Amino acid sequence: MDLRYDVAGVGPTLVLVHGVTDRRQTWTPVLEQLTPSRRVVTVDLPGHGESARLADGDDVLGQLLEELSGFVRSVTPAGERPHIAGNSLGGWLALAMAARGEVASATALSPAGFYVNHADKRRAALTFRTFRGLVQVMGPQMPKVMSLKGLRYPSLAAFYGHPSRVPYENAVINANSLATNALMDRVMEATFDRPCASVPVVPVTVAWGRRDMILPVYQARRVRRVFPQARVMVLPGIGHVPMTDDPDLISMILLGGSFAPTQISPG
């Protein structure tokens, strides 16, 4: 497919994958820290940002995974094994590629797919749909409404631990995408079967924001049932889309660095 992407930096290839209704620019806050030592590839998933829409089909996650897998192969220099990181839906895709042995390592930030039961999954879908409904009700007045901090910050609180750090322009673009993205309902209805690792162990890191209201932090305790080798951390003060909340911390995680004592591993 025609996927829009950007490449910056030098070093081992690191592909960054956004979540549902998001876009590749969501990674901008961490690029300055990553590009001195990584060749960073940011991509718009099918049906997101500037990429072409995804064809109709029953297995939307399978389609996204195959498109992303082919894309990663195409942008990785010959003879190199890429690293991958993703947020939310992108985290699930990154872990699925790790389970298939297609990457050198995978990092997932609040990945989808670790719901405790069906009701937990429906709660996450309802949260997305509720906020989409609110944005749709605003209609053409949405940019004006979002210009008011007293309304903008609460509307972003489910997604960000620090809504005040999200630029107004980004908030408007994200709200419009939430209201219009044609793929969201298909993703919300997907089963999110947990990847089954059937290959030699690939290093996996999973970091979860304690302020995540979309995929609450209790889901992090289920990661090691699928990836027993995973390094799992809970990040105080961090929300569902963490790159804006604390770029330095998220960059450190993406680079595989050391961590402060406030990062804990759930049992």
Image: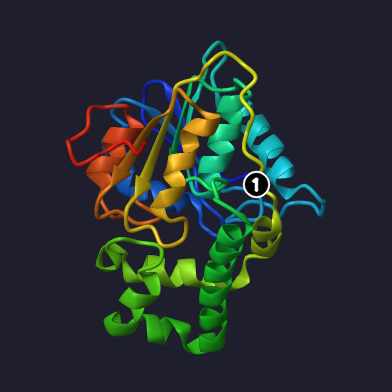
- Which three-letter amino acid code belongs to the residue tagged 1? Phe
In the picture of the structure, the residue carrying the numbered disc 1 is: 192
Drawn side of residue 19 relative to residue 198, left or right: left
Image position of 49 with respect to 68: above or below = below
How far from the left and from the top, in percent, is residue 184? 64, 62
For the C terminus, the quadrant is top left
**Residue 81 percent location from the top left of the image:** 52, 17
Residue drawn where x is 31% and y is 25% of the image: 37
With respect to residue 126, does 24 lie above or below? above
Q: Secondary structure at mark 1?
A: loop
User: Which residue is most to the top?
Assistant: 79
Between 84 and 114, the residue placed more toward the observer is 114
Q: Nearer the viewer, residue 228 or 93?
A: 228
> Percent position (x, y) of residue 78?
57, 14
Q: How many marks?
A: 1
Looking at the picture, tell me which residue is in the foreground, 69 or 106.
Answer: 106
Please name the residue shown 56% across and 26% down the image.
98
Residue at (46% x, 61% y) in the render: 214
Q: Quadrant of residue 132?
A: bottom right
- Image position of 155 with respect to 23: above or below: below
- Horizontal side of 52 relative to 142 (left or right) equals right
Left or right placement of residue 124 versus residue 257 in this view: right
Coordinates of residue 161 in the picture (x, y in percent): 30, 61
Is 50 placed left or right of 218 in the picture? right
Q: Between 212 and 159, which is closer to the camera in this rendering?
A: 212
| Residue 140 visible (yes or no) | yes
